[in-house]
Amino acid sequence: MQPIYPLRSYIRFSAKSQLLAEQLGTAVAQHFTSTSDVDPFGTPPTSVSEPSDYSQNSLPRFDDELFSVVAATVLHPCRHPEVYEPCASAAEASAIEDRVSAEIVAAYQNVQSPFKAEIVERLNQLL
């Protein structure tokens, strides 16, 4: 039996999907699975349906560069060595993926919150 590792690509995908869904203020339908249903090449089956009534210009701005930095920091081997170690079961790997993904979301939102507050303050001053 092959060792089961948490998938860093799945962790990043899951975190980004959650952040985008929260920015849109709507549920983004996610049809993907975790480590337990990975094909032999290590690619999780993924499909995200986007709302059709949004144009590219009306979508909230997502800071990809910030997300990349936050994800790289959270996924660093010194911070989460368990992501780089084999797991005893697919359930254990899935739990690690969920926990680390939630940490990425929380860190991104924590960094973004001062910027949002500043923008809201400026808009309120204009009123």
Image (cartoon, rainbow, N blue to C red):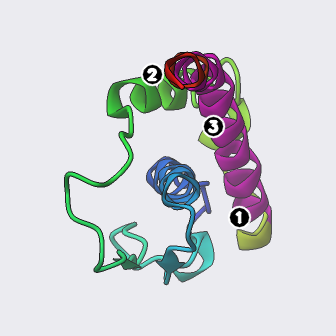
Q: Is residue 84 above or below residue 13?
A: above
Image quadrant where one finds the C terminus: top right
Residue flagged by tag 3: what amino acid is it? Ile
Residue 12 in the image, given as x and y percentages of width and height: 49, 47
Q: Amino acid at mark 1?
A: Ser
- Element under disc 1: helix
Q: Are marks 2 and 3 in contact (CB under 8 Å)?
A: no
- Of mark 1 and mark 2, the one earlier in the sequence is 2
Residue at x 53% of width, y 55% of height = 7
- At 55% from the left and 19% from the top, the residue drawn is 115
Give the mark nearest the N terminus, 2 or 3: 2
Asked if residue 19 shows in the view, the reply is: yes
- Mark 3 closeness class: few <14, some 14–19, many ≥20 residues within 10 Å: many
What residue is disc 3 on?
A: 104
In 3D space, how far apart are the residues under numbered discs 1 and 2 (Cα atoms)?
Answer: 23 Å
In the rendered image, residue 96, in percent from the top left (x then y), is placed at 74, 52
Look at mark 2 in the image and give the residue it sits on.
Answer: 69
Q: Amino acid at mark 2?
A: Val
Contact check, label 1 and label 3, Cβ < 8 Å:
no
Q: Quadrant of the N terminus?
A: bottom right
Q: Spot the residue most to the left.
A: 56
Report if residue 8 lies within the magenta region: no
Give the overall secondary structure of the magenta segment: helix
Instruction: Answer with the quarter of the image where residue 95 lies.
Output: bottom right
Relative horizontal placement of residue 114, taking residue 29 as reference (left or right):
right
Going 59% across and 72% down the picture, which residue do you hit?
Answer: 34
The residue segment tinted magenta is 92-120
Residue for badge 1:
94
